[in-house]
Structure formats: structure tokens, C-alpha cells
Image: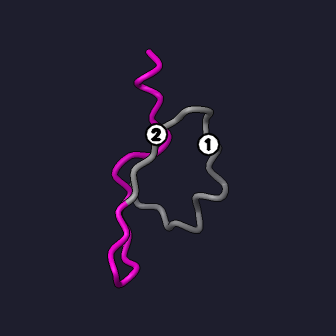
């Protein structure tokens, strides 16, 4: 997913969804998982 973190404010967050972000000391970021609800299936 190639989204800027600021763009996430427009993404609807689902109840109990799991998101995983990696942010390093230089404030570079990587989104590993966003809004995953697979655990609810």
C-alpha cells in the first residue's frame, strides 16, 4: 500500500481491525497491515 500516513485520516477504521505500522527513528514509515479483520472470520 503506497499511502502517506496523513492520508490515513480519510480511511475508515473498522471496529476491532488490526493495523501494523513500522516507523523508524528518521520517521520513515511502512504500513504492513491496515484494517485487517481476518481474525473475525
Q: Tell me where residue 11 appears, x and y as whole percent.
A: 62, 49
40 relative to 30, above or below: above
Q: Residues within 10 Å of mark 2 (few under 14, many from 20)?
A: some
35 relative to 2, above or below: above
* 34 vs 1, nearest the viewer: 34
Say whether residue 39 is magenta. Answer: yes
Say whether residue 26 is magenta. Answer: yes
Image-based side of 18 in relation to 7, left or right: left
The answer to whether marks 2 and 1 mark residues whose Cβ atoms lie closer than 8 Å is no
- Could you tell me which residue is drawn at 41 percent across and 25 percent down? 38
Q: Tell me where residue 15 appears, x and y as whole percent.
A: 62, 33
26 relative to 35, above or below: below
Alpha carbon distance from label 2 to label 1? 9 Å
Specify the segment rendered in magenta: 22-41
Residue 16 picture quarter? top right
- Quarter holding the N terminus is bottom left
Q: State the mark number for residue 18.
A: 2
Q: Tell me where residue 13 appears, x and y as whole percent.
A: 61, 42
* 36 vs 3, nearest the viewer: 36
- Could you tell me which residue is drawn at 34 percent across and 81 percent down? 25
In what element is the residue under mark 1? loop
Please count the marks in the image.
Answer: 2
* 39 vs 5, nearest the viewer: 39
Q: State the mark number for residue 13.
A: 1
Q: State the mark number for residue 5.
A: none
Amino acid at each position: 500500500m503506497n499511502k502517506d500516513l496523513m492520508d490515513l485520516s480519510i480511511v475508515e477504521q473498522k471496529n476491532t481491525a488490526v493495523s501494523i505500522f513500522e516507523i523508524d527513528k528518521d520517521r520513515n514509515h511502512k504500513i504492513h497491515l491496515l484494517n485487517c479483520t481476518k481474525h473475525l472470520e
